Structures are given as C-alpha cells and as structure tokens.
Amino acid sequence: MNDPILLTPGPLTTTTTTKTAMLRDWGSWDGAFNALTASVCHDLVDIIHGGDTHVCVPLQGSGTFAVEAALGTLVPKGGKVLVPHNGAYCQRIVRILGYLGREAVVLPFGEDAPAEPARISQVLASNPAISHVAQVHCETGTGILNPLPEIAHVVARQGRRLIVDAMSSYGAIPIDLQSMSIDALVAASGKCLEGVPGMGFVIARRTVIEAAAGNCHSLAMDLHDQWIYMQKTSQWRFTPPTHVVAALRSAIDQFLADGGQAARLARYSENCATLVSAMRKLGIRTFLDDSVQAPIIITFHSPPDQAYNFPEFYRRVREKGFILYPGKLTEVDTFRVGCIGAIGATEMRRAVEAIATTLREMGVKRLAVK
C-alpha cells in the first residue's frame, strides 16, 4: 500500500533514495560516520554562503530543540531579546525565552502582516538594553514570509545581534550570510532539504559560538560545548541520530544535483501556484495576500458551512491519499496545505481533486467566507 502524501510543513514526503539511505547502520564514533557528519555540516554552511565566517553545529532532536539551544547558548543570561511577533512560532520563541530566564520584548504584528523593519529599528533605537533580535523568517503558522534582508540590515545598523529561525525557509528561500549580518540561523533536517526529522542545526558566526562558553542553561542544549567537542574529536558528544544524518546526506546530494536552492524554490513556487489557483476555483480563499505568501505552506479559510468540520474533512481526504494540516490561528478558522517535500504540481492537482470530492461528499456547499 502506498503511503499518503504529506501536505504538511514537516515531516515531509521523501524520495525512495532518501529512505533507502537509512537502511545502513552506522557506528556513532566510527571514522566513516564522523566524515559523514563533517560533510553534511560543510554543505549546510555552504548552501547559505557561510564561507569561513560561520560554522554548523548539529543537534539531536526537532527544530524547536535547536531554536532553544541557540537562544540558550548565544544569548547571555543578562541578554534582552526583541521578538517581532506575527505567528505561532514567534510565540514559541517568547515561551522559550521565558523558560530560559531571558527577558523578551514582544513587538506585535498582525498574523497576516509581515514584520516591519522600520518598526524594529525604532524599538531598538529606543531601547538600548536590547542585545538580540530573534526573527522567524517564514512563519509556519500562516506561511507568511518576513523580509529578512531588510530586517538584518536594520538590526546590524543598530549594532545588535540577530538570531533567525529559518526552519521553513532554509534551502528554498535565498539566504546569503555574506550579505546579511546574521549571528545564527536555525533550521532542521526534515523541512525544505527534504530529509527526515530528527536533527536540528545552528549555523553560527564562528566568533560568536567560540565566545558563548558558560551561557547555556543545559548540558544537552549547550551548542558551545557541542562545537568544542566536535572540533576536538570529530564526534557528537552524545548518541547521534545516525540514520537521520545518513538520510540528510542523501537528501543534500539530491538537492545539489537538482539545482540547489533556486531549483527547490522554483518547484515549490509551481506547487504553490497550482494549489492556490485550483483552490480559488473551488471558491476557497487564502488567508494571506499573495504579496506576503511564501511558497511553503498555505493557510486557507475553512468553509463557513455547518456541514464542514475539520476532523471529518481530514479523515476523508486522508483516505484519498493526502494528509493535511490543521490551522494554527487563534481567531480565524483555517486549515493548511503544504507545498514542500518530494512532490510536484501533479500531486497538488490531485490533492485539490481529493479536497473537492470530500467537500461534495460532506455536503459542504458554502465554501467562501465573506
């Protein structure tokens, strides 16, 4: 039986080649596995043009583990962090900072509005105690794309440090560490690189990670300790996710062979355009304006029909071979459809056909909100 296609922001549908890479067992201290890790880290830095200024520190666990590790390691205990807030994953950063005992300054934006560099600059100018900005690049809760190059520019101009959650953008949206002043960028294996979940990574400015000794609240989350240990031994400090690393090596090889970031963006953009056009023809509206929509995951307004309920909608669409994602908004009823993974426009058209058939089966006639 074929697995359903995952139209989610991760885990994703992966290629057979990526799955096959996990069929081999690796010794966690073996030289061959250490070389595999080193090659992955090298390429992860190279994909966003980190050059010699930035290094990659991998970490076991989900992307959120790596976000917490970055904040806990790179923000000193007396640091103060500005969080431009326009979605659920911005809110998660605020929660993490609370657990870490780092002061957060929240700059709110609407969930359908990108963070504004000018407002960020104003807050930084008026609050010199702020040491860092924690910016989500693509807010996965809605799919909105925040203007990272402009934000990086104003943060640097104000003399502050920038930590970027690029979980849903790394590998698809252009990021250039030689032209953007970014202290650390966080992503994970199971997103736009199309690996499997289980490994986060932080690409940090070398001088910043080297100066971060003693900051972290946790042994397991201490990126500085992980970095130093790997430099001395070529090994992970604790048991690594060996099969995940092997799958990521294969996924990166495919990513590069396919044409890298530009090709990945082109495929996802085609997926997005195909999905949005077909859904609008059904009468289902997108939550975001096209001008701020990243081609990663699309938030749709739920049909305002009494016959519609998401659990039943989800179940029926899944029976037809597609797994959707619930909405992440607090005040608007929505659902989300991902455009990423080892899929193309053909799968997107089939998904919309499954959605249309399901809505007819459920007797949903009123599809568009006013």
Image (cartoon, rainbow, N blue to C red):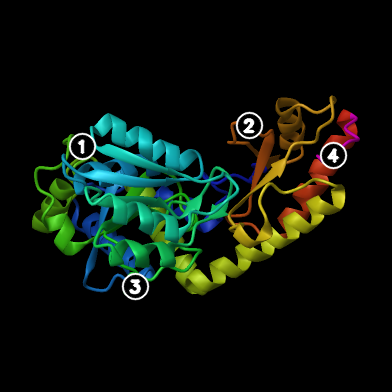
Q: Residue at x 55, y 56 (%)?
A: 15
- Residue 62 visible: no
Q: Amino acid at mark 1?
A: Ala
Q: Amino acid at mark 4?
A: Leu
Q: The N terminus lies in which quarter of the figure?
A: top right
Query: Reading the chain from its start, which is encountered first: label 1 or label 3?
Result: 3
Q: For marks 1 and 3, give the CA distance.
A: 28 Å
Residue at numbered disc 1: 220
Q: Nearer the viewer, mark 1 or mark 3?
A: 3
Query: Reading the chain from its start, which is encountered first: label 2 or label 4?
Result: 2
Q: Are marks 3 and 2 in contact (CB under 8 Å)?
A: no
Q: Quadrant of residue 246?
A: bottom left
Q: Are marks 4 and 1 in contact (CB under 8 Å)?
A: no
Looking at the rendering, the stretch of residues picked out in magenta corresponds to 363-370
Q: Position of residue 231 (x, y in %)?
A: 12, 58
Label 2 element class:
loop
Residue at numbered disc 4: 367
Q: Residue at x 48, y 62 (%)?
A: 147
SS assignment for the magenta stretch, majority? loop
Q: Residues within 10 Å of mark 4 (few under 14, many from 20)?
A: some
Query: Reading the chain from its start, which is encountered first: label 1 or label 2?
Result: 1
Left of 158 or right of it: where is 318? right
Q: For marks 1 and 2, give the CA distance.
A: 37 Å
Q: Amino acid at mark 2?
A: Glu
Pick the residue in front: 316 or 248.
316
Q: Position of residue 80 (x, y in %)?
A: 24, 43
Residue at numbered disc 2: 331
Q: Amino acid at mark 3?
A: His
Q: For marks 3 and 2, give the CA distance.
A: 39 Å
